[in-house]
Amino acid sequence: MDGNRVLVTGGAGFIGSNLANHLAADNDVIALDNGFLGTPENLSEDVEYVEADVLDDDLPTGGVDVVYHLAALSSRQMLEENPREGARVNIEGFVNVVEQAHDDGCDTIVYASTSSAYGSRTEPSPEDMDLEAATGYDASMLGRERYAEYYNNFYDDISCAGMRFFSVYQGYGGNEAHKGEYANTVSQFTEKIANGESPVLWGDGTQTRDFTHVDDIVRGLVRTGEEELAGVYNLGTGEAYSFNEMVELINDALGTDVEPEYEPIPLENYVHDTCADISKIKEATGWEPQISFEEGVERVVEPYRDD
């Protein structure tokens, strides 16, 4: 993508800031964020930062070629603590951004959805399988998808592509540190192990995740915008690792031998296993992940070696 004016909502957050900084090398990029889950310190000086909310009436959508709508209350816990606010931000905020962008002539929308609605599966999950809203967060993000379906079906001059992210990580040496308890487990566990603390694993540590490095996510988002795709697409690796395997990889990379602690799973409807079927996005754009989990862990631990 080159020479475009791009708006990234949630642009000071983890994924949003990585995307905004990457695009700013060749594009005019606006990062919009209300500061709740993001910090402008994540952004390079080439990115224009606008402190605003996706529910505002006057968003900076004028002259924008592509909108990446990543702003969301992005966890199960957040929606359980404040379900009404979660629905407003995740659904009404999405509609508000799309409507204003469309009114100002933008025809390409790429937005964050979720892979958690697949539930627990050890087999790769394809986009066309039946989904279930087991949590309020799932419900809100699937609400986005239904509205995007409406826009794609009934507007000839707009395309909306929903991205179902799988367990995105970067590490506290990147733009993830500000998320704290909401950061990916790879980042949280590495921080603990590097400081000689035992990470706490729920259950017996055999649960699996399709851990996907943020750099691969950014490349997938860029390709989706370039191709002006519509519909929903998985962004993952197609490979899953258990939490026990993750802890072992972190220990190996750090040269440590910190044993985890195990506690009972405290949640109902806990997603035990995830894995992405990435054939759809690969066929549509040629995208495929480039960073193996082993390499990703090496990147996460690198800053701790410099201390």
Image (spheres, rainbow, N blue to C red):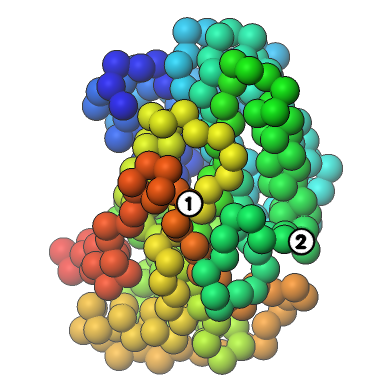
Q: Can residue 90 be seen here?
A: no
Mark toward the viewer: 1 or 2:
1
Q: Can residue 209 be seen here?
A: yes
Q: CA distance from mark 1 to mark 2?
A: 21 Å
Question: Residue 20 at x, y = what percent?
Answer: 38, 32
Question: Residue 51 at x, y = what percent?
Answer: 53, 23
Specify the quadrant that holds the C terminus. Answer: bottom left
- The one of 153 and 134 positioned closer to us in this rendering: 153
Residue at figure coordinates x 64%, y 23% from the top left: 98
As helix, strand or loop, the secondary structure at mark 1 comes to: helix
Residue at figure coordinates x 52%, y 69% from the top left: 124
The image shows residue 23, relative to residue 209, as above or below, that is: above
Question: Residue 6 at x, y = what percent?
Answer: 42, 21
Q: Which residue is mark 1?
A: 280
Q: Residue furthest left?
A: 306
Tell me which amino acid carries mark 2: Glu
- The one of 25 and 220 positioned closer to us in this rendering: 220
Q: Is residue 153 left or right of residue 240?
A: right
As helix, strand or loop, the secondary structure at mark 2 comes to: loop
Residue at figure coordinates x 34%, y 86% from the top left: 248
- The one of 288 and 185 positioned closer to us in this rendering: 288
Question: Residue 193 at x, y = what percent?
Answer: 36, 78
Q: Is residue 239 left or right of residue 142?
A: left
Q: Residue furthest front?
A: 283
Which mark, by number, is residue 299? none
The image shows residue 134, relative to residue 30, as above or below, that is: below
Q: Residue furthest right?
A: 84
Badge 1 or badge 2: first in the primary sequence:
2
Rendering quarter of residue 107:
top right
Q: Which residue is mark 2?
A: 132
Tell me which amino acid carries mark 1: Lys
Rendering quarter of residue 36:
top right
